[in-house]
Amino acid sequence: MGRPLIFVNMDNAPKFCDNRCNNTNCKKHISKLAGYYGGAVISKLRDTPDCEGYISKWKQSHAEIKQIKKDKREARIAE
């Protein structure tokens, strides 16, 4: 005997973003899902109207590394 199909209307379900970027202040960031109970839609919201601002982990970490190297060079010059 076949199993019945169950359809769930997810039109009003909250959306969470699965891009895993560094914008943790975003209301839809995947980290906010941990405190939520109930059904939710998880999808990549980057470049959509629902996105609150994508912050690349790679670009941010490389910018920090460049800044640290620059600070070290300036500190050696100042000595």
Image (spheres, helix red, strand yellow):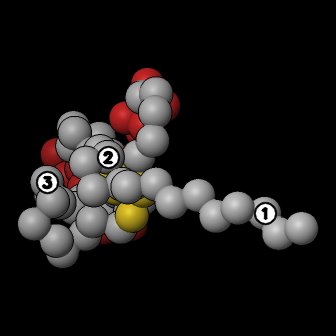
In which quadrant is the C terminus drawn? top left
Residue pointed to by mark 2: 13
In the picture provided, is 5 more to the left or to the right than 56?
right
Q: Residue at x 41, y 46 (%)?
A: 40
Asked if the residue under mark 3 is in contact with the one under mark 2, i.e. CB atoms within 8 Å, the reply is no
Q: Nearer the viewer, residue 72 or 47?
A: 47
Measured Cα–Cα span from mark 2 to mark 1: 25 Å
**Secondary structure beneath label 1:** loop
Residue pointed to by mark 3: 52
In the picture provided, is 23 more to the left or to the right than 4?
left
Q: Position of residue 53 (x, y in %)?
A: 15, 58
Dot 3 amino acid type: Glu
Dot 1 amino acid type: Arg
**Secondary structure beneath label 3:** loop
Residue pointed to by mark 1: 3
Residue furthest left in the image: 49
Q: How many marks?
A: 3
In which quadrant is the N terminus drawn? bottom right
